[in-house]
Structures are given as structure tokens and as C-alpha cells.
Image: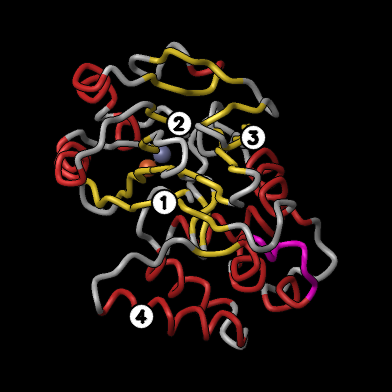
Amino acid sequence: IMHVIPISCLTDNYAYIINDDVSKKVGVVDPSEASPIISYLKKQNLKLDYILNTHHHYDHIGGNIELKKLYNAKVIGFVGDKHRIPGIDITLEDNVKWIFGKSSVKILHIPGHTLGHICFFFENEKIAFTGDTLFSLGCGRIFEGDHQQMLTSLNKMKKLPKNTKIYCGHEYSYKNAEFCMKYDNDNIDLKKKFEKIKQLRSNNLPTLPTTLEEELKSNIFLRCNQNDLKVKLNMKNQEDYKVFRKVRDLKDSF
Ligand code: ZN
Ligand code: FE
């Protein structure tokens, strides 16, 4: 069984320790900083084999070098970002499969937030690490790509199996829910999701993982192709990417 353990880093980042108790392989996804990872590994008496990076931002790679030195772990990232992922050892291309222990991990290139952003999709376990591209009830800011690129990337995520567990890079769910509620307030699934998020956050628990199924129903950024949302935004019959651009702009100033 594959265990995924969220580790709070910096202010609102999550790194995820992945621990397969069959193959005994251990990895960490997006270590913002080394110390919280090291203390967890020590407590559990674990080593570290791999460091997986979804993209090059400092709040996702900050712990790479220290962890690599300490554990002799291999750093995995997108080939196009090999010049800006510290310590990278294994470079992966879009659509290739990489093996973690006994798990097959499909690499999905999902540019928009950054040009080299990828998702790690564990095919059998149906676990996706989506970094800063798909959040619960949100999506990442568009720093390097354009809106069409980001929308294409989100559409790629939408094609994963519905029961995929989504682990993203930040605890933004509460704020994202408030934004979704502002423009989609009669969405019953969204209301339910918001209640769940309130409950978890009031107990200081992570709201992740979310599932693709819940996101498809409640995440306004995944609903930009749907007529009921277009009507709510006074954008009936407009192209999906224009609706998406509008929603992204509204969120940027929310
Ligand atoms: Zn980022
Ligand atoms: Fe980030």
C-alpha cells in the first residue's frame, strides 16, 4: 500500500511523503524546506530514495539540495526544467512512465503556472500530485504560460479517472471556496464541499486530498465550459477560454 503523508511547510505549502510499504521506497513531492521532512523521516525511521518536483518555484524545491546530500536521494523533474531544478538527476518527458517501487507513474506536462510544470500520476493507485496547477476549488496563477495553455492543462487533468485523489501544493481551499461561492453560490455540490472544508480547517486538518469528481462539480475553474456557469457570468455562448480568462482575472483581484 502506498501511504501519502502531507507535511506542512513554510506558511501554506504541503510537501508529501510517499511511502510504499511493499517496495519500501520512500519519496517526497515538492519539499519546500528540508527540516520538516527530515524530522518526519527520523521519527518514522525512514530513508529517502527520491525527491519529486512538480515545478521549479522555490516553495517546491527549497529542500532539494539538503535532502539530496543527507540521504543521497535522486531528484526527479521535467526535462525542460533541468536548468532550474536544483540537483536534478532524472529528467522526464511528457507522457513517459517512471517507476517508483512497483508503481507506474505517468508524467503529464501541464504548463501555464510555469512552462515546465508537470503532474505525477500514480496510475494504479489513482493518485495525482498537481503542484500549483490544479488546487482544490482553484487553479494556479498564470506566471509563464497563457490562459489557453493553462486551460488545456486543466482539461488534461479533467480526463483522469474521476476517483483520482488530488494532492496539490498549497492549502488554499478555504479562500478558494469563498471565491467559488461568490460566483457560483447556488451550486449544491460546492456548498457541501465548503462545509467539509470549514470543518477540516476548524480542526486544523489538511483539506487534501480532494477527488477529481468533487472538483469537477465544485471547482469554478473546471466549469468554464458549462453553460449554467457561463450564464451566471453573463457570458452565454462565449468560448471556454474567454470564460476561463475572466474567472482567472476575477480571482487575481479577489
Ligand atoms: Zn508555484
Ligand atoms: Fe507554490
Q: CA distance from mark 2 to mark 1?
A: 22 Å
Q: Along the line of sight, which residue is nearer the eye, 50 or 221?
A: 50
* Residue 106: image tag: 3
Q: Residues within 10 Å of mark 1 (few under 14, many from 20)?
A: few
Magenta stretch, main secondary structure, is loop
Q: CA distance from mark 1 to mark 3?
A: 18 Å
The residue depicted at 46 percent of the width and 42 percent of the height is 22
Q: Quadrant of residue 213?
A: bottom right
* Residue 198: image tag: 4
Residue 218 sits above or below residue 158 on the image: below
Could you tell me which secondary element the residue under label 1 belongs to?
Answer: strand
Tell whether 182 sits left or right of 187.
left
Could you tell me which secondary element the residue under label 4 belongs to?
Answer: helix
Q: Which one is in front in this view, the residue at disc 2 or the one at disc 1?
A: 1
The residue depicted at 32 percent of the width and 49 percent of the height is 14
* Residue 3: image tag: 1
Q: CA distance from mark 3 to mark 4?
A: 33 Å
N-terminal of the two: label 2 or label 4? 2
| Residues marked 3 and 4 touching at CB (< 8 Å) | no
Quarter of the image for the C terminus: give it: bottom left
Residue 144 sits above or below residue 239 on the image: above
Q: CA distance from mark 2 to mark 4?
A: 29 Å
Q: Along the line of sight, which residue is nearer the eye, 4 or 205?
A: 4
Q: Give the extent of the magenta segment.
A: 222-227
